[in-house]
Amino acid sequence: MRQLILDLAWDPLPPFAGFLPGDNAAVVAQLREQGWPGAPVYLWGPAGCGKTQLLRELQARAIEAGLVAQWFDASSSTPWELADDAALVLLDGADQWSDAQQHAAFTLFVEAASRVGGVLHALADGVAGAAMALSEAPAAGARLGVQFASAGRLPPVDLQVREDLRTRLGWGPVHAVHPLAEAGTRDALRQEAGRRGVVLGDDVLDYILARFARDLKSLMHLLHRLDGFALAEKRAITVPLLKRMLDEEQAQRPASPSAE
């Protein structure tokens, strides 16, 4: 009888601790040291290169500091509303946004800018209560602004988006994020396996890397499923076990409708 395994979450690592930089060491270093608020940051690269994970690392850094971070992507329904206490806004999947989502993203930039402008205008004009307005401006250490960090598969100049949004996405540093080479991918899988308390032999890694796209996100998901399957079967992770899991997953998929 197969053991029932609960899908328990693992303790999160400190921000950036679980990211293997590979050729992206300079990008990671800049994101670690990014002062908030600052110019918008944009990350671009192919699917699975790690750009979404880097946005998540920035999100974790903000939360660890007690700041409010908002996340929007192509799956987020509109309108997108800027929280009163937002310190960080993360925008993922810029190359996949609908017209409505492009408008929503642009509106976030405008609202953040107007929030800062209102406080500064009050200070410049000596309006009574301006000091109070400044003290009540949102986001703790980022009180005079909101940090934006965005990502997509293409650089801003190549995105099929409205021009005013393109300008704002590319206003600050634009970083290319490079996929891990095979050695880096092996290291990433081994590191995650070690964190889970399991061992991946070279034969298992060879099998995975020869048959699956080197998209780190999907490979990590594969490892998550394989770990759960091995626990349920009370077996070590081997190539035969991996094949059996894949066969069972294939058998459980609904059959494609035949053409009439």
Image (cartoon, rainbow, N blue to C red):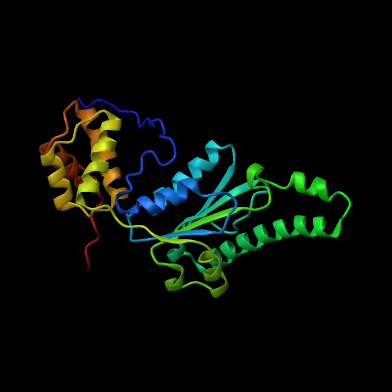
Query: Can you tell which quarter of the image residue 153 is in?
Result: bottom left
Quadrant in the picture for residue 135:
top right
**Of residues 248 and 71, the one drawn nearer to the viewer in this rendering:** 71
- Residue 25, percent from left and from top: 35, 50
Q: Position of residue 217 (x, y in %)?
A: 32, 49
Residue sticking out furthest to the right: 128
* Quadrant into which the N terminus falls: top left
Q: Nearer the viewer, residue 254 or 244?
A: 244
Number of numbered labels in the structure image:
0
Q: Nearer the viewer, residue 82 or 61?
A: 61
At a point 48% along the width and 61% down the height, the residue shown is 173
Drawn side of residue 249 relative to residue 102, left or right:
left
Q: Residue at x 14, y 40 (%)?
A: 204
Vertical order, 74 against 190 (above or below): below
Q: Vertical placement of 253 versus 109: above or below?
A: above
Q: At 55% across and 49% down in the image, what residue appears?
A: 35
Residue name at image x 27 percent, y 42 percent: 188
The quadrant in which the C terminus is found is bottom left
Residue 143 percent across, percent down from the top left? 68, 47
Task: Answer left or right for 135 relative to 147.
Answer: right
Is 202 positioned to the left or the right of 173 in the image? Answer: left
236 vs 48: above or below? above
Point out residue 211 in the picture as x, y percentages from the top left corner. 15, 52
199 displayed left or right of 92: left
